[in-house]
Amino acid sequence: MRILEFLKDSHGDTQASGMIHECGLAPMYHRVFSAAEQRHIEDRQEEFPFSRGEYVASRLGEHDMISDLALFSQRFSANLEERFIGVRLKFVGAQFLVEAGDWYELHLFIQEIIRDADNLRAHLPAARELTKECCELHIRYAYQILQDIPPGNIRGEHLGYWVMSHLLEEETSFDRALHYVEQGLTQGWQGNWDARIKHLQKLAPPRSTKATIVNLSDSRPPGSTMPLAPVSPSQQPTPPPSERHVACPECGQKMRIPGTFTGTCGACVKCGHRVDIPAH
């Protein structure tokens, strides 16, 4: 048994099975890779020096697993398709860091994956969707990452916001692209945000007609770039008939959707997670 057994069914090994299912890697592995790709990976794993028994015996943690997966992924470099397998192996491994709640390590690791996937998307259409999924993961945990940056470390860049804004611009979703750029700027990540904002403002619709998700709370959440409506406590307006209320499926943040909102989805004002907006 080799390292990739951690990503598949463990065939009765209860100690290894606990790691697999607690981290949710087995279903993700089967979702990300086709049956043919799984066979190819399993053939290649024979070259990998660590057995499953050695991992269990030495009780190596998730960071060791991540490092070894990253090394293993480098064996897939013969062509574009193989490189895409290697990038997806690392993406599957990132789930370890999510489950461990090690947000700064996730930040560093997912940035590496975004770079690799973004370099492939010009040649492989499927790499575009992976790039987007990596950006969404990076954005989803941006607030946790900020809290987990070690003292003395610079904030650096956040590729999730930056690359996602370019992907959305290519899809002509200029307003959503602008929203993510503004979030990156507000949270203090490094980048040429001002020039990017000016560029997208020329393409996005005027802010007077922008459909926004408005926070229900009285305070502005960390990272939010959308202003609260100035409402006097003694003069609470009656919500219009078409007004809707939703909760973010990721962090539970409650939000009010104005009746003027015509989109089908938006971004949570607290964590940036995608929120589907009901029609009524």
Image (cartoon, rainbow, N blue to C red):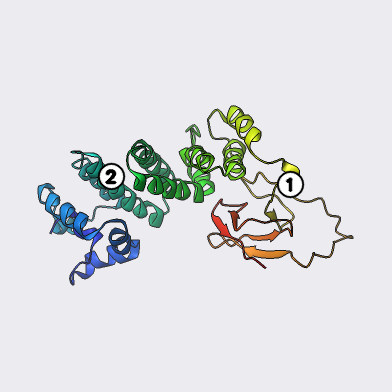
Q: Is residue 198 above or below residue 236?
A: above
Q: Which residue corresponds to the image point at 54% horizontal and 63% vertical from the top-left?
A: 249
Spot occupied by residue 122 in the image (x, y as percentages of width and height): 36, 37
Spot occupied by residue 4 in the image (x, y as percentages of width and height): 20, 56
Spot occupied by residue 194 in the image (x, y as percentages of width and height): 61, 29
Residue neighbourhood size for the residue with mark 1, other residues' Cα within 10 Å, grouped as few (<14), some (14–19), many (≥20): few
- Residue 254 shows in the view: yes
Image quarter in which the C terminus is found: bottom right
Q: Tell me the element at label 2.
A: helix
- Residue most extreme to the bottom: 12
Image quarter in which the N terminus is found: bottom left
Q: Which residue corresponds to the image point at 55% horizontal and 42% vertical from the top-left?
A: 172
Seen from the viewer's position, the closer of residues 83 and 171 is: 171
Q: Earlier in the sequence, mark 2 or mark 1?
A: 2
Residue type (three-letter) at the residue carrying disc 1: Thr
Spot occupied by residue 155 in the image (x, y as percentages of width and height): 50, 34
- Residue 150 shows in the view: no
Q: Is residue 59 above or below residue 68?
A: below
Disc 2 and disc 1 in contact, CB within 8 angstroms: no
Disc marking residue 84 = 2
Q: Which residue corresponds to the image point at 20% horizontal and 42% vertical from the top-left?
A: 76
- Report which quarter residue 17 is drawn in: bottom left
- Report which quarter residue 174 is drawn in: top right
78 sits left or right of 116 in the view:
left
Seen from the viewer's position, the closer of residues 221 and 195 is: 195
Disc marking residue 209 = 1
Tell me the mark number nearer the camera, choosing from 2 and 1.
1
188 sits left or right of 78 in the view:
right
